Image (cartoon, grey):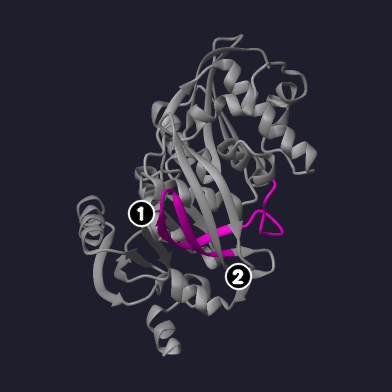
């Protein structure tokens, strides 16, 4: 596919583990070609690819928001050489680890196999990673990269192959929660809860960091022995207060189509029995700046459609008022308010996973 490059843009979300990239080009017939790549640093490589030919402005916007809207990051322009390097870098991971390449592979396989450049991945780190200004934020990102078995990022930020080789998981694990305590002079202790392939664990991580020319560096990291913990203990640790507002839906199919068109930045998950879950993330990753990082603190709201009912879960009075206010203004012809509830711990997602069709029956069963 011979294409004339127009521009490319990328999310500065490498520190969260994945990035969205859009490459805009023109083919030999004058068609506008937009290519959307999801690049994952935690084992999946080039894991999503969509190509649009002469899309409308609305269609292109929807696809961009689907790809980038939930990553909580600024978007920057990058060069043709940089975009091709990233396709090669991440696509080569798929091949190395025998992971299936995404989408129409013939569109980009020649780049993976034959593109030549002197760029090194570390040359791009100042671009692909957001600027970290606070010590606690940097500590949380380094703990996250350790749990994710992210050798590349740990090596870059430490300048040490030994630190880069450290890992505490069997696979690319998931950081669930930290409690960060400062010991002064750039020294921190993180009580860390994470998920591995065989369960949940807790450990303590001691980190020493410094700032050189306005950039943080990881000087050292020591990990205590990890201890397994039960799933209900994890739930207690990461659960939070939840408001659930309940509506009935008139013309459910039309409503869901319009809702997703209006909100392409939400993550859509088609569940069993024709139910649909939408997750709305914050437009930034400020939750990483907190002394206590919690994985689900980047969620602003969840929406669940089930059997003619629409459930809306929010996690503060401010967000509840804002989210439900938007619904009442934009979808009054579809939604009729029925009820609202407050829970000291998350309830709506448990209902989603339960497979129960009746929220009130679900609550009765939980008592």
Dividing the picture into quarters, in which one does residue 317 lie?
Answer: bottom left
Q: Position of residue 170 (x, y in %)?
A: 72, 59
Q: Residue at x 72, y 18 (%)?
A: 115
| Residue under label 2 | 200
- Expressed as whole percent of the image width and height from the top left, the position of residue 78 reads 50, 21
Stretch of the chain drawn in magenta: 165-194
Residue at image point 69% right, 68% down: 198
Callout 2–callout 1 Cβ contact below 8 Å: no
Task: Please name whichever residue, 203 or 16, is drawn nearer the observer in this view of the structure.
Answer: 203
How crowded pointer 1 is (Cα within 10 Å; few <14, some 14-19, many 20+) is rated as some
Please identify the quarter of the rendering in which residue 162 is found: top right
Q: Is residue 32 visible?
A: no
Does residue 242 show up? yes
In the rendered image, residue 168 lying in the magenta stretch gets the answer yes
Horizontally, is 56 left or right of 226 in the view?
A: left
Q: Circle 1 sits on which residue?
A: 255
Does residue 38 sit above or below 221 in this rendering? above
- Please name which of the two marks, 2 or 1, marks the residue nearer to the observer: 2
Give the residue at x 61% y 36%.
Answer: 159
Residue 132 is marked as none
Residue 243: give x, y in percent of width and height.
29, 70
**For residue 263: magenta?**
no
Task: Pick the quarter of the image with the C terminus.
Answer: bottom left
Name the residue nearer the viewer: 111 or 147: 147
Q: Secondary structure at mark 2?
A: strand
Counting from the top left corner in percent of width and height, residue 131 is at 41, 34
Which secondary structure type mostly characterizes the magenta part of the structure? strand
Which of these two is toward me, 213 or 359?
213
Residue at image location 25% in from the left, 58% down from the top: 319
Helix, strand or loop at label 1? It is: helix
Give the left or right position of residue 252, taking residue 356 as reference: left
């Amino acid at each position: 596919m011979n294409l004339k490059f127009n521009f490319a843009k990328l999310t500065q979300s490498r520190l969260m583990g994945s990035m969205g990239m859009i490459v805009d080009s023109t083919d030999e017939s004058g068609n506008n070609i937009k290519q959307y790549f999801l690049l994952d640093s935690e084992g999946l490589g080039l894991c999503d690819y969509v190509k649009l030919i002469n899309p409308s402005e609305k269609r292109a916007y929807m696809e961009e928001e689907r790809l980038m809207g939930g990553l909580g990051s600024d978007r920057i322009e990058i060069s043709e050489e940089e975009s091709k390097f990233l396709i090669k870098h991440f696509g080569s991971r798929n091949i190395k680890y025998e992971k299936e390449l995404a989408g129409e592979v013939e569109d980009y396989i020649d780049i993976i196999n034959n593109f030549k450049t002197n760029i090194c991945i570390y040359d791009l780190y100042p671009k692909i990673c957001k600027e970290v200004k606070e010590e606690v934020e940097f500590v949380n990102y380094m703990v996250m990269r350790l749990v994710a078995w992210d050798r590349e990022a740990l090596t870059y930020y430490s300048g040490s192959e030994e630190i880069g080789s450290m890992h505490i998981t069997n696979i690319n694990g998931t950081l669930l929660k930290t409690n960060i305590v400062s010991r002064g002079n750039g020294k921190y202790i993180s009580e860390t809860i994470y998920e591995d392939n065989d369960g949940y664990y807790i450990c303590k991580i001691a980190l020493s960091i410094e700032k050189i020319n306005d950039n943080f560096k990881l000087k050292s990291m020591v990990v205590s022995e990890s201890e397994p913990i039960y799933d209900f203990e994890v739930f207690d640790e990461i659960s939070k207060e939840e408001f659930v507002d309940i509506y009935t839906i008139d013309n459910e199919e039309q409503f869901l189509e319009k809702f997703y068109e209006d909100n392409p930045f939400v993550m859509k998950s088609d569940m069993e029995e024709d139910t649909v879950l939408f997750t709305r993330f914050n437009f930034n990753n400020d939750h990483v700046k907190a002394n206590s990082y919690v994985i689900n603190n980047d969620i602003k709201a969840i929406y669940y459609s089930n059997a003619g009912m629409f459930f809306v879960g929010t996690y503060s009075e401010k967000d509840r008022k804002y989210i439900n206010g938007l619904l009442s203004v934009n979808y009054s012809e579809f939604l009729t308010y029925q009820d609202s509830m407050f829970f000291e711990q998350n309830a709506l997602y448990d209902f989603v996973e339960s497979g129960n069709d009746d929220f009130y029956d679900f609550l009765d069963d939980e008592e």
